[in-house]
Image (cartoon, helix red, strand yellow):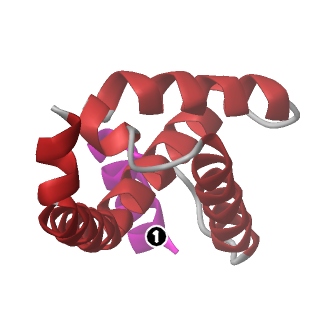
Amino acid sequence: MLNLIQMNLSQILISLIVIGILLFLYKRGKKEIVKKIILSLVIQAEKTLGSKTGDLKYAYVIQKVYEILPFYIRGLYTKKEIGNMIEEAVIYLKKFLNSNKDLLGYIEEYKKVEIDNMKL
């Protein structure tokens, strides 16, 4: 067995390098999708748990990320990378909310806003 590995060491190394490059490219291609999923979970946590519950919202988002993402995608990202993506999503959401926009999220509420705007 050891002789077989030694005889094919260059092929094994080249194969590992190619697999590593493919994983890197796959991860890079999926990063935007994972960021969008995390942003939607951050918005959902904000709607569900409200303000001043940062730790609960963070735990909620982490739990949902691990429930939603397939294991082969989760395995490509470290906990730190996922944490950084959550922080980026929170910063984006804060900027969004500070621009006087609201997270209504329901068609009935949008219709209500449209009707109220028409009366003005």
- Give me the residue at 31% from left, 52% from top: 111
In this orientation, does residue 109 appear?
yes
Q: In this view, does 117 lie above or below 50?
A: below
- Residue 65's x, y, as percent? 45, 33
Q: What residue type is labelled 1?
A: Asn
Q: Report the front residue among 89 and 81.
A: 81
- Give me the residue at 19% from left, 71% from top: 14
Q: Report the front residue among 61 and 118.
A: 61
- Residue 63's x, y, as percent? 53, 21
Q: Give the range drawn in magenta.
A: 105-120
Q: Is residue 76 above or below residue 113?
A: above
Q: Is residue 119 magenta?
A: yes
- Residue lying farthest front? 3
- Residue 23's x, y, as percent? 26, 62
- Residue 25's x, y, as percent? 26, 74
Q: Report the front residue among 115 and 25.
A: 25
In this orientation, does residue 48 appear?
no
- Give me the residue at 32% from left, 29% from top: 68
Q: Give the residue number, with chain letter if any, for mark 1.
A: 117
**Disc 1: CA contacts within 10 A as few (<14), some (14-19) or many (>=20):** few
- In the image: residue 31, left or right of residue 42: left
